[in-house]
Image: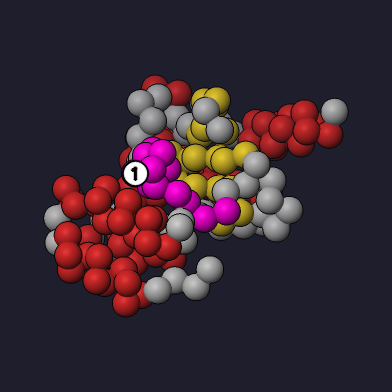
Amino acid sequence: MKTNLTQIHEVINQHGTNREALVEILRDLSQRSGYLTKEAMEVVATQLQLPPSEVFSVASFYTKINVEQLGKHVIKFCEDAPCHIAGGREIWEALEHKLGIQFGETTTDGFWTLWPTSCLGLCAVGPVMLVDDEPYGNLTPEKVTDILNHYRAGDAA
Ligand code: FES
């Protein structure tokens, strides 16, 4: 779906650019368009001067906010500082490389969606990601490969 920039700016003008308006903005845009696109969330992040990961996190948290075409399995990767310091950058790059997509995208076969997210409260075992609602910590590129293969094998079985 094409992102309607005029509509996004109308909604932001209506609610204002304070952080507190984020949920209402996302909910309003989701209702008007049916669901939010990655581009729409990036525009909102820019306008409210928030990290895109925060906007993605909020959008995925609220059930009344629909997000465009999620894959069968959704990976939410923590990109906050403690996980980043623990080696998150290497894992981030490994995920993008192994899945062939960038953050905020879904694989062409509809199997995976890859999202950044804020702290998951599991900093002690960073880097951390959720696959659907299952947490995985102390990630290494090898462990990521094993986890992805596990889900593929599970679906093939
Ligand atoms: S910073 Fe990653 S789980 Fe807290």
**Element under disc 1:** helix
Position of 88 relative to 5 (above/below): above
- Residue 42 to residue 26: above or below: below
Snapshot quadrant of residue 15? bottom left
Q: How is the image coloured?
A: secondary structure
Q: Which residues are magenta?
A: 58-69
Q: Residue 49, position in %: x, y?
A: 23, 60
Q: Quadrant of the rendered structure where residue 106 is?
A: bottom right
Q: Nearer the viewer, residue 19 or 91?
A: 19
Left or right side of 91 for 64: left
Q: Position of residue 3 (x, y in %)?
A: 44, 71
- Residue that sits furthest to the bottom in the current view: 6
Residue 142 in the image: above or below residue 42: above
**Residue that appears at 77% across and 28% down:** 154
Is 100 on the left-hand or right-hand side of 130?
Answer: right
- Which residue corresponds to the image point at 32% horizontal and 77% vertical from the top-left? 6
Is residue 82 left or right of 128 when viewed as pictured?
left
Q: Magenta includes 108?
A: no
6 or 114, nearer to the observer: 6
Q: Give percent across and percent down for residue 110.
A: 68, 51
Label 1 neighbourhood size at 10 Å, few (<14), some (14-19), many (20+)?
A: some
Left or right, residue 109 beside residue 84? right
Q: Which quadrant of the rendered structure holds the C terminus?
A: top right
Q: Can you identify the residue that label 1 sits on?
A: 58
Determine if residue 24 is in view.
yes
Magenta segment main secondary structure: loop
* Residue type beneath disc 1: Val
- x 38%, y 30%: residue: 120
Q: Nearer the viewer, residue 3 or 78?
A: 3
Residue 64 lies in the magenta stretch: yes
Residue occupying image coordinates x 30% and y 56%? 28
